[in-house]
Amino acid sequence: MMERTLIIIKPDALQRNLLGEIIHRFERKGLKILGLKMGILSDDVITEHYSHLADKPFFPKIKNFMQSAPVVFMVLEGLEAVSAVRLIAGETKSRNADGGTIRGDYAMSIQANIVHASDSVENAQKEVARFFASEEIFEYKKMDFEWVYSEDERGA
């Protein structure tokens, strides 16, 4: 099933000049970029996005880190995109992430772990809506669609 998911490329990735490499990995997998923008996270948005951590003693560190530089937001689409993106991103605790994943290749930290990736289809829908207005998401046909997905997967 075709899904959409959200990626946030974190401040550490921008500081370390990894933006192009990260986008390249998602494109190389065959995922379609529907939206892409850069911004600074406000206090309210960080608190909403990390609401499950907002009462933890380490939350101020997360907030400071996520506001230390701009972030890049991406909406990606593809067959089972949520799980595909999480596979490419690697385990959240980067020290344990497999080599060949973004976190396995570029991070050692839990907090400074290069990217945020939606963890479920339901959360992906909420997160895409949190960071993108409908007019910032672009529908288009990719020319490589037939090569990326078989007829069975496309529902043809």
Image: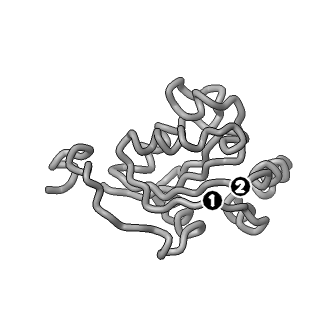
Q: Position of residue 117 (x, y in %)?
A: 55, 49
Residue 39: name its quadrant.
Answer: bottom right
Image quarter of the C terminus:
bottom left
Horizontal placement of 141 versus 21: left or right?
Answer: left
Residue 106: name its quadrant.
Answer: top right
- Residue pictured at 61% horizontal, 48% vertical: 9
Which residue in the protein does label 1 denote? 38
Q: Position of residue 151 (x, y in %)?
A: 15, 49
Binning the other alpha carbons within 10 Å of mark 1 as few (below 14), some (14 to 19) or many (20 upward) gives few
Q: Position of residue 18 (x, y in %)?
A: 61, 39
Is there CB contact under 8 Å for labels 1 and 2? yes
- Residue pictured at 80% horizontal, 51% vertical: 68
Residue 142: name its quadrant.
Answer: bottom left
- Reply above or below: 22 against 142: above
Horizontal placement of 2 versus 37: left or right?
Answer: left
Please state which of residues 45 and 123 is positioned toward the viewer in this rendering: 45
Question: Looking at the picture, which amino acid does disc 1 mark?
Answer: Met
Which residue in the protein does label 2 denote? 70
- Residue pictured at 24% horizontal, 46% vertical: 149
Image quarter of the N terminus:
bottom left
Measure how far apart labels 1 and 2 are at the Cα level: 7 Å
Question: On residue 30, which mark appears?
Answer: none
- Residue pictured at 28% horizontal, 61% vertical: 141
Q: What is the secondary structure assignment of the residue under circle 2?
A: loop
Binning the other alpha carbons within 10 Å of mark 2 as few (below 14), some (14 to 19) or many (20 upward) gives some
Question: Looking at the picture, which amino acid does disc 2 mark?
Answer: Pro
N-terminal of the pair, mark 1 or mark 2, is 1
Horizontal placement of 106 versus 57: left or right?
Answer: left
Count of numbered tags: 2
